[in-house]
Structures are given as C-alpha cells and as structure tokens.
Amino acid sequence: MVIATDCKIWVWAALGGCVGLCCNEGVAQSTTTVAQSETVVVTAEKRREPLGDVPMSIVAATATELDNSGVSSPGDLEKIVSGFTYTPSPYGAPIFTIRGVGFFDESVGAAPTVSVYVDQVPLPFSRMTEGAGLDLERVEVLKGPQGTLFGQNSTGGAINYIPAKPTDILQSGAKLDVGRLGHIGADGFVSGPLAETLTARLAVLVDQTRDWQQSVSRADSRGVHRFANVRLLADYRPSSAFSLEFSAGGWLDRSDTQAGQFLAFSPTTPSQQGGFTGSPVQPNLVADLQALAPTPHTDRAADWDPGISLRRNDIFHAFSLRGDLNMAADLTLTFISAYSDLRLTDPSDDDGTQYENLRVTVQGKLRSVSEELRLAGGRGRAHWTVGSNYEHDMTHDLQHILNQGTNSGLFKNTPLEYRYFTLGNLSDQKIDTAAVFASGDYGLTDALTAQGSVRYTDTKRVFDGCLLDGGDGQFGRGFGLLSNVLNGMTTFPAPGDPGYIGPGACATLDPSTNRPLSDVHNSVHERNVSWRLGLSLKAAPDLLLYANATQGFKAGNFGTLPLIYPTQAASVPAERLLAYENGIKKTLLNGRIDITGAGYYYDYRNKQLLGYINTGQVFGDLPGEVSIPKSRVIGGELSLTVRPTGGLSVRLGASRVDTKVTTDYFISRPVSTVAGLQNINGERFPETPKWNLIATADYTRGVTPAWNAFLGGNTNMRTSTYAAFAPTPDFHIAGYTLLDLRAGFERNDNSLRIEFWGHNVTDRYYWTHVARIQDTIYRLTGMPATYGVTISARY
C-alpha cells in the first residue's frame, strides 16, 4: 500500500501579496509501481476532477490513510491536515478551525465557520458531525472560504465526507478493536445488489471505553465512552442516464461528558468575593475554593460533583435523496433533498472541583431541511454549474444551570440579601436561507484557465428566548424582588403583581419599566454576495500554478446567554473574509516526489467569537458574543511526499498562521479580578497555534508469498496559544507533540489484516482548552496513551 500526495509549492507574491506556504494533500493506493500513483479524483467543485488539476488548497485522504492514522471523527483530522485545529468547548460543541478561521461558541445552535458535509449534504451544526466518519471512501478538506459552492457559513473552509458506495458484487468486511482502558470497538459492512438496477450498502459501528478520568478528591472515576452508528445507502440506476441515491443513518452517544482540571479560584463578581451567607442547603463555597490546590498535572486527574450522573443522551437521524439526470452528453441535472435532526441532553460539571459551584445540563434540539437543484455542463474548454439552495433550520437550546457561586444571589450584606440555586438560559431560533449560485471555468489557452463563481444569499434568523427561573421559583422570586427594588419597593411580589415571576417563567427585565418580560424576540435579515476569481496555469503535465481571490461571509449569530436585559440579545453582524491565495502543485522524478505549497492573506471584518461581556452587578463578567471589527491572517503551508521505494512513503507538512487584530477594540478580560476593559489591538486570535507540523511514514515489505509486514507512524506538533483574548497566564495552552505508532501483518489480497497500534505513545500530558465560566479557571486535557490491536477482514 502506497500513500500518494499531490502537492504544490508556494512562490513569493510579486506585489506584496500573501507571505507563507500552503499545501494540498491527497492519498491514493498504488496500483503499479511507486512512480505511477493512481490519480486522486475529488469533487471539491461539485464535479469529478483530478486533485492535481483543482486550483485550490485541498487535503484528500482515503479510508486507508484515515484508518492508519487513527482518524475516526472530524476532530481527529488534526493528525493529517496541517493548519486544522479542533477545540472542545465546555458545553460539548466541537470547534473546527482552518488557518485561524473558526467560531468558538458554546451554543448548540451556533453556525460554524468550517462547514461539514456528507456527500455534499450539509450538517449545518457542528454537534451533528460526530458520526460523519463511518465507512468512508475518502474525506476532502477544502481550505479557505468556500461560500460560492458550499454556502455562506464556510469562511474557514469545508469538510466533505464521501461514504463508500454500494457495489455491483457482494462484498463484506468487519473490524474488531481491543485496547487500553477497556476499549472495545467493532464495525462492519455488507454491500451488493438487491435487484438488477438496485444496490445497497449497510454499515454499522459500536464503540465503547471504560472510565478514563480519576477523581483527585475521592475514589471515583468517570469517562465512559459509548457510541453506536449506522448508515444505509441504496442506489437505483434504471438506465445509464438516470440514478437515485438514498441515504438513511443515525448515531447514539451515551458517553460521559469530560471533567476539567481545577487551576485557580477566580470569582465572577470580585466585589462579592467573600460570597453570600451560607446554609446547610446552599453553603458558601468561597473558603473551600480559595483553599483548593490546583489539580496535579496528569492527564487522567480531574474532579466533579460526587453522586451525580454526567452521561449524555444524544440521538441523531439523517435522510437524503439525490438524483442525477444526464440530459445530454455534456449536461447533467442534479437535485439533493435532505433532512437531519439531533436531540441531546448533555450534563456537564464546569468548575473542575468536587464542589457544586457550577453544573449545567444542556437540552437541545436541532433540525435542518435542505434542498439543492443544479445544472452542470461542459464542452471544449468551458465547464459551468448553476443552481439554487434552500435551507430551513430550527434550534432549541435550553441550559439548566445549578449555580452556587459568587453571583448566586442579590443584595449582599443588606437586609434584603437573597440567594438562589437554579436558573436557565433559553434560545430558540428559526433560520431560513435561500441562495442562487453559478460557477465556471474557461480555457483561455491550452494551458491557461480562468475560474469564477458567485453566490447570492438571503438569510433571515429569528430569535426567541430569555433568562429563566430554574423551575423551583427561587430565582424568579429573587428577580421579582430585584424588579420591585428597581421600582422603589422592598417586598417580594405576590402572584398577580407586576414584578411576579413564576416557576419556570421568563426573568429578563424590560429596561424601561424593570418589569419581567414574557419573552425576548429579535430577528436579523441579511443579504450578501460571495465570489471567487482565479487563474490557473498548467505549465507542464506535472506542474500547476494558480492564484485566487475569494470573498466569503458568515451570517450573524444569536448566542445563548443570561439575558438580564433584551439588549444582550442583539445579533452580532455578519463576518466578511476577503482571501488572496497563490500556489503551485508539482510532481518530480516521475511521481516519486510531490510538493505542494501556497501563501495566503486574509482581510477579516467583524470576526465573530465568544468573548467576555460585563452583564452587570448581578452576574458580572460572563461569556458573550463579540465581533472584532478588523483583523488579518497571513500564512501558508508546505507539504512534501516522498516515495523512494515501492514499500516506503513519507509525508511531511508544515503550516504557519500569523493572526492579528488590527484595530482598537475593548473587551472584558476572562477573569474579573483584573479591573477595566482591555484593548486587544495587536493580539493574536485565541486557540490558534502559530506553527503546526505533521509527519507520516509507512513502510511495507513482503515476508512470505502471501503476507506483508508493515510499520508506520505519524506525529503532530503544534506551538502554544491562548484560550481567550486579553488572557492571564492561566489561559496559556502549551505547545505539544503527539506520536502514534503502528505495526502488523496483512495478506497480499487485503483479506486479513492484524495491526498493533499506540496513540500518544509517549503519554504526553497536554491540554486542549482553558475556561472560566463561574468562579474557577479549569482545563480540559487530551487523552493519555492508548494502545491495542485491530483485526480486520474483507470478503
């Protein structure tokens, strides 16, 4: 088995343009000799093209490379895609970032900047992507804005998973994993014809691991992983001119949410650092938190509230139907209809301690319906596509919060002092998006081609939500008292009074009357035009040069926040990214060496992310939506693949991302003990390492006429970064290097494979995120060393 990478090398821009390196990678199985690697075909421009002829930055990896590198989820793509980072958020939403462009938000309904698709069917919310990697043919990662063909919310890029298709002959396969921490995983598929014109493929996966986290305060453990996934594909081809592809699938996640490591006490409201008066039912935790030592620096150490379940209950379903009609030899009509829904219940302990300082349970519902119709054609030197999209999304995000922190009360040190236990944040949204798009390329000469694409998008987003009583009436009673005090009274309102807030009712106050509202309603209507222009030069059969200019947009966003006043529910504006990129793809020595590289410059306006906002005397500084007016990204990537012999392949990749805020912008610091606002002009983006290096090596050698032995490994290195703007040292995320190794035996006909593997074999202690939501700063760590054996068979 040989890994082939189609690469391009970057050249300096002549007029002060982009500075850096960028790479496009692909993987293929060698069918003959090392110097004659099979051409990798991708669908990045929604038509089948050789990877080396596509004038943009793409990483294309086959199922074989994904398995070899231990890539089973979108977050694992860090191992093979330079410039890609994955960050877990405290409430469980995965954050994907490409070239420094990502959207960190804890809301389950937040639209990402890196869009994920399964065979061009959108998964519009990152929480839906967990099972996308089942039974794949390949995955394509498109770097840079992809708004013209993949929609406005893809300023960072797009990830397109292509499942393995049904086969015309009966085939089947199975795989069994057994490893450390009680890991047991099994998956398999069966594929073949059901009738003369109908084929189908069924794939199933079950994966589980025992507790991997250990409490530092008592004999307790947690961290169970339980996940199941299924997908059914059916292809109906009554003639060579018409086909229908049906897909149905879903997944179930019953894993524990991850516990954090306590770093330091950091009160949300410094003026109330001493805390409110305690009681046996609701103790004052300040002294306990102040005396608590930081969690030891071991990857399995953590802490959480005793005697509670933090088990997820997430269920996802998806259905799609695609039809292709060849109306003529050079004209194809395609439609794609899709439906997906996710229901989740995710409890999490968000303070990293054994004390009940903060615990959150997110109950969410996400639903998406999408339609696409497009017409594609090509003749001679011209290829074109025109089409339209419509998408209707609904989100429900309800955060049940148990709060015993320094902001869990009102009127401290006064006769009216009052405490509460629970509250809630509610965000319901409806998003309607309609778009028309067109793209085309034309060969100006036999070697020089001009490309262009454009999309007009109309989006309407409607928000309904508020700050809620937790259901027991305590929070509502306290906010009812606050409403009365703001209106000159010092009594608790009774049912029927203007300030009364019943159990589970909205507690957001009207800023003009200071009386509770029944609901907070807001909406935003946006229109934008995304476009891409480019030139590519096929200077030789093994050399492609290209230059692109692209403008992409990400729609405005409403967060899920404690809305004390409705002004906090204002949408952040749409972000705009104008990107310039140039690059080269080059093959040397008759296919033995592939080099890819490019440089890019991004002009970034209204960058959206989750920062910290002062919400007033009651709650203090809390996470909130912010929008950075001006910033920029300069960087690039380089990739080199060498195949010196028929059994050896080595791939090296490097990415440098230089981000910077380029205008004055003042935000609250992530810790309230530092007074005042901080100007972040000149700061780098959070969660964005400047350097990322990856390396993969595989060697195969025949040991008998029927068996081969193989040896391989991959490493991923990233430099340090910070978890927030205006950070303190506690928010530093140290750089790290992870090493995976593998070895084993396989039959020449691929019918049987035995692999011994290890992930993070040096047991490197590292952390992936730092947060402060309530009164503590805490870390989320990466996984410790894991190792095991995999046995797979195909028939």
Image (cartoon, grey):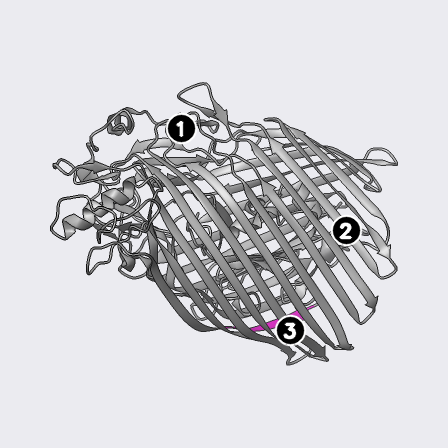
Residue highlighted by disc 2: 201
Identify which residue is drawn at 68% across, 41% down: 205
> SS at mark 2?
strand
Spot occupied by residue 69 in the image (x, y as percentages of width and height): 64, 41
Spot occupied by residue 413 in the image (x, y as percentages of width and height): 13, 35
Residue highlighted by disc 1: 305
Sort mark 3 into few (<14), some (14-19) or many (20+) by Cα contacts within 10 Å. some
Instruction: Name the amino acid, label 1.
Output: Asp
Residue stretch rendered in magenta on the structure: 530-540
Q: CA distance from mark 3 to mark 1?
A: 53 Å
**Mark 3 or 1, which is nearer the eye?**
1
Q: CA distance from mark 2 to mark 3?
A: 26 Å
Instruction: Name the amino acid, label 2.
Output: Arg
Query: What is the quadrant of residue 588 in the picture?
Result: bottom right
Q: Which mark is residue 374?
A: 3
Kindly check if marks 2 and 1 are in contact, taking CB atoms under 8 A apart as contact.
no
Q: CA distance from mark 2 to mark 1?
A: 44 Å
Quadrant assignment for the C terminus: top right
Quadrant assignment for the N terminus: top right
Sort mark 2 into few (<14), some (14-19) or many (20+) by Cα contacts within 10 Å. many
Let me know if residue 14 is in the magenta part.
Answer: no
Label whose residue precedes the other's in the sequence (2 or 3):
2
Left or right of 732, for residue 450: right
Kindly check if marks 3 and 1 are in contact, taking CB atoms under 8 A apart as contact.
no
Q: How many marks?
A: 3
Evaluate whether residue 537 shows in this view: yes
Label whose residue precedes the other's in the sequence (2 or 1):
2
> SS at mark 1?
loop
